[in-house]
Amino acid sequence: MKQEEIELLVSILKNFGYSIETNKKVIGKSGIEHKFAVIAKKANTILFFNFALDDKVELSYLGMLCAYIDLKANGRRFILLANTNRPIDIGVSSLSDKIDLLTYSDIKELSSKIHELLNNL
């Protein structure tokens, strides 16, 4: 994850009316501390964003799954952003309405996919 990617994400979220926190830790019901690159809040919606390295996408998705289980509540959605060109098979589709995996190959595609996600919420 590059600073440019975080700044782009924050900028887009602010344009959509979200308040932003970066590098935030949230303690779950289990007592485990979950760290997120960006947390965005608007009305009754909270979005949790993390970035994954290309070779750690599957592992990062499992971490996001654990965070979802520990933090789940109405209005919460978890988004993992991964800069990769390879196909990703996470093997879990039943939670796709709560955990999104957005892959992108460059900053332009990242911008497009974030806009699409937010427009469809």
Image (tube, helix red, strand yellow):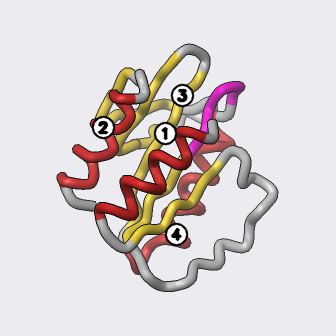
Does the residue at mark 1 contact the one at mark 4 (Cβ under 8 Å)?
no
Q: Which residue is mark 3?
A: 46
SS state under label 2? helix
Q: Which residue is mark 2?
A: 10
Q: Which residue is mark 1?
A: 48
Does the residue at mark 3 contact the one at mark 1 (Cβ under 8 Å)?
yes
Magenta-colored stretch includes residue 74: yes
Q: Position of residue 5 (x, y in %)?
A: 27, 54
Which region of the structure is painted magenta? 73-78
Q: Residues within 10 Å of mark 4 (few under 14, many from 20)?
A: few
Q: Position of residue 109 (x, y in %)?
A: 39, 64
The amino acid marked with disc number 4 is Leu
Disc 3 to disc 4, C-alpha distance = 23 Å
Q: Toward the viewer: 7 or 46?
A: 7
Does the residue at mark 3 contact the one at mark 2 (Cβ under 8 Å)?
no
Name the N-terminal-most of marks 2 and 1: 2
Residue found 37% across the figure and 21% down from its top: 19
Where does the N terminus fall, quadrant-wise?
bottom left
Q: Which residue is mark 4?
A: 59
Residue found 29% across the figure and 35% down from its top: 22
Disc 3 to disc 1, C-alpha distance = 7 Å
118 with respect to 35 (left or right): right
Disc 2 to disc 1, C-alpha distance = 12 Å
The amino acid marked with disc number 2 is Val
